[in-house]
Amino acid sequence: MKAVVLVGGEGTRLRPLTETIPKPLLPLMGRSFLHHVLDHLAAHGVHEVILSSPYLEERFTPFIESRHGDPLITWITEESPLGTGGAVLNALGNVEETFFVLNGDILTDLDLTAMAAAHDASGASVSISTMHVDDARPFGLVITDETGRVLEFREKPADLIPGDINAGTYLIDPDAVADFERGVNTSIERDVFPAVIGRGDLVRAFASQCYWMDLGTPGKYLRAHFDILEGKVRGEEFTAPYLEGAEVDLTASLGRWVVAGRGVVVGPRAQIEDSVLLTGASVAAGAKVRDSILGPGAKVGEGAMVVGTVLGEGAEVSAGDSVADARISTRTEAP
């Protein structure tokens, strides 16, 4: 089986981290998040993955070269942004049978094997994974009948409403989308799915209460790390408070929910809580960091305090400064 993984977004809600790193390549527990997605697919029998992105395309080359074994990666150059639907339609020449489509910024332990079996048994043209939530406004609301047939796909409803949401994993028969125009910016949520439903094709929901987290904001990016540390994500097993290759002074204090990547340096008496420190970041003596993300090579000076803040790659907070609820852009100093 093959899959299209949607990796073309610019990750604006995660800036400044995504100024220099595409969102799917941001580290999760010390490895590019896309590794986790591809490993999950391989575990469920997916042998080829199709990727494309016009945003920071060159950053994907080292990642692709680092992969070995399943799944094989096929890269399609996307000259201009095609949107979620356009990227899928652009990949149709590389698929001959039903294929998975996944959003490349979602951490999930969804049982893809069970979803594929349900799809085959139903005879549907499209299956959409769904989850029940109390507030569907940030998501796509999926309206179904009692049999699980999708009647309506309402992207990001305006009013607070509980319901089943689009969980960002699909199975699609190529014939169901073959007639859509290719090479233009198209939304799979706003354009493709409503049209397929409207013409009467069988579109079914695959309901699940698996682990699911959209990593699109700093808060959710942090939460995904903490959930893995708490053992909430099947197939993701980490227990160490920091990763191999970090240098942490014996007098420093790291809380239970702290992840420090390779090359991170934490100085004497530094205090870190509920934070992620990416490759090569440093926290000097006596500094305090809480509820924050430090990008690659970011620096927090001696005695500084950083709370609820995201530092871009190489950004700095000077000694003695205090920063709260800020986003410090790549290679700049906090004001």
Image (tube, rainbow, N blue to C red):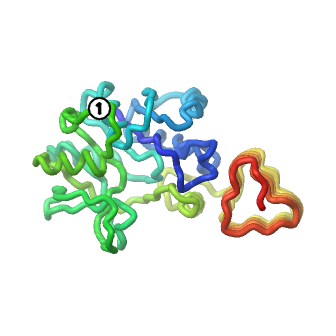
Query: Can residue 52 be seen?
Result: yes
Q: Position of residue 271 (x, y in %)?
A: 79, 67
Query: Can residue 245 be seen?
Result: no
Report the side of 288 relative to 90 (left or right): right
Q: Residue 74 lies in what quarter of the image?
A: top left
Q: Quadrant of the N terminus?
A: top left
The total number of labels drawn is 1
Question: Is 206 placed above or below 40 here?
Answer: below
Task: Identify the residue shown where x is 60% and y is 30%.
Answer: 62
Q: Position of residue 257 (x, y in %)?
A: 65, 64
Report the side of 306 relative to 69 (left or right): right
Q: Crowding at label 1, few (<14), some or many (≥20) Cα neighbours within 10 Å?
A: some
Q: In which quarter of the image is the C terminus?
A: bottom right
Q: Position of residue 24 (x, y in %)?
A: 52, 44
Q: What residue type is labelled 1?
A: Arg
Task: Identify the residue shown where x is 21% and y is 62%.
Answer: 143
Q: Where is residue 205 in the image (x, y as percent from the top left)?
A: 23, 55
Q: Pick whichever, 201 or 189, lies toward us.
A: 189
Task: Identify the residue shown where x is 66% and y is 59%.
Answer: 327
Label 1: element kind = loop
Task: Identify the residue shown where x is 59% and y is 34%.
Answer: 59
